[in-house]
Amino acid sequence: MSKKALHCKIGPSVLNADLSQLYSESQRLLNSGADYLHLDVMDGNFVPNLTFGHPIIKCLRPKIPEAFLETHMMVSKPEQLKCQFRVELDCRGRRDRGSNLGQWIEPSADAGVDQYTFHIEATDDVPLICRKIRESGMKVGIGLKPGTAVSIVEKYVDLADMILIMTVEPGFGGQKFMTDMMGKVKWLRNNYPELDIEVDGGVGPSTIGLCAEAGANMIVSGTAVIGAEDPGKVIATMRDVVENSIQKNQLER
């Protein structure tokens, strides 16, 4: 059986972008070399912040039809829709009701989401959510908060396409990178050499080396990219560091 080839993928988070210009900001990041876009969906419950939901993503999708969209679902019940989003406006400014009162998963798929990443802490039935995500045609990501032991995800790795290790507490951008989370990344890479491992929080040129050395290959970077004078240069710099680390690790196996 052939081994899966790991590649570096850079997914800027739009959380700290000008959300009133979501399309133009997204296109700017894609033009700068982003491999995918990381969209933070927050319900004001699982995390204290509140962002946007699937109606906004559904408006964005036709404008960037080729982009890979990952939603990072920071919501208390990733299989359900919280009441905060019942009055979210659709693309034409109308109240978006109907099917949006059902679940998070199916509306996200309908909005054109490619990967649905939920938090293991938010549910008691990880296998059920993974199955529902796949049945909806999306890839599966499982996220871990800083206080969650990485060993908890071991029995679910085979159900997921990617594991996300949070390197800050989820909910707000611009936080300080938590170096001690690299132990989780190393554990995953040592035990699952072909797994896509994502890191999110405080990642930029000054911390990318630690992430790459630990074994992360999917990089979410918000403030460091969004606020850069030359986002393309930042993305290219981080990509080079990660790709070099991947090649080095492959030679050492």
Image (spheres, rainbow, N blue to C red):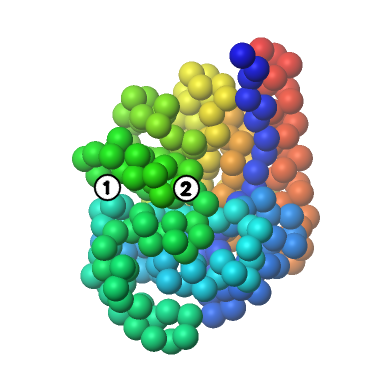
User: What residue sits 69% from the left and 19% below the top?
Assistant: 250
Q: Is residue 150 left or right of residue 80?
A: right
**Label drawn at residue 77:** none
Q: Where is 62 relative to 136, above or below?
A: below
Residue 180 visible in rendering: no
Are the two marked residues, 1 and 2, in contact with CB atoms closer than 8 angstroms? no
Tag 1: amino acid = Ala
| Mark 2 surroundings within 10 Å by alpha-carbon count, few (fewer than 14), some (14 through 19), many (20 or more) | many
Residue at screen point 42% across, 27% down: 158
Q: Position of residue 77 (x, y in %)?
A: 25, 53
Q: Position of residue 173 (x, y in %)?
A: 48, 60
**Relative image position of residue 128 (x, y in whole percent):** 28, 39
Identify the mark at residue 122; answer none if there is no mark.
1
Front residue (pair 236, 135) = 135
Q: Nearer the viewer, residue 1 or 143?
A: 1
Relative height, residue 135 to residue 106 (above, below): above
Q: SS at mark 2?
A: loop
**Alpha carbon separation for disc pair 1 and 2:** 19 Å
Image quarter of residue 218: top right
Apparent side of residue 73 relative to residue 63 in the rendered image (left or right): left
Name the residue at 41% across, 42% down.
Answer: 134
Q: Is residue 20 left or right of residue 34?
A: left
Figure quadrant of residue 217: top right
Residue neighbourhood size for the residue with mark 1, other residues' Cα within 10 Å, grouped as few (<14), some (14–19), many (≥20): some
Q: Nearer the viewer, mark 1 or mark 2?
A: 2
Is residue 90 shown to the viewer in this render? yes
Q: Earlier in the sequence, mark 1 or mark 2?
A: 1
**Which of the pair 157/92 is nearer the observer?**
92
The answer to whether 181 is drawn above or below residue 119 in the figure is above
Which residue lies under the disc numbered 2?
138
Task: Name the residue rendered at 30%, 52% in the picture.
Answer: 78
Q: Quadrant of the C terminus?
A: top right
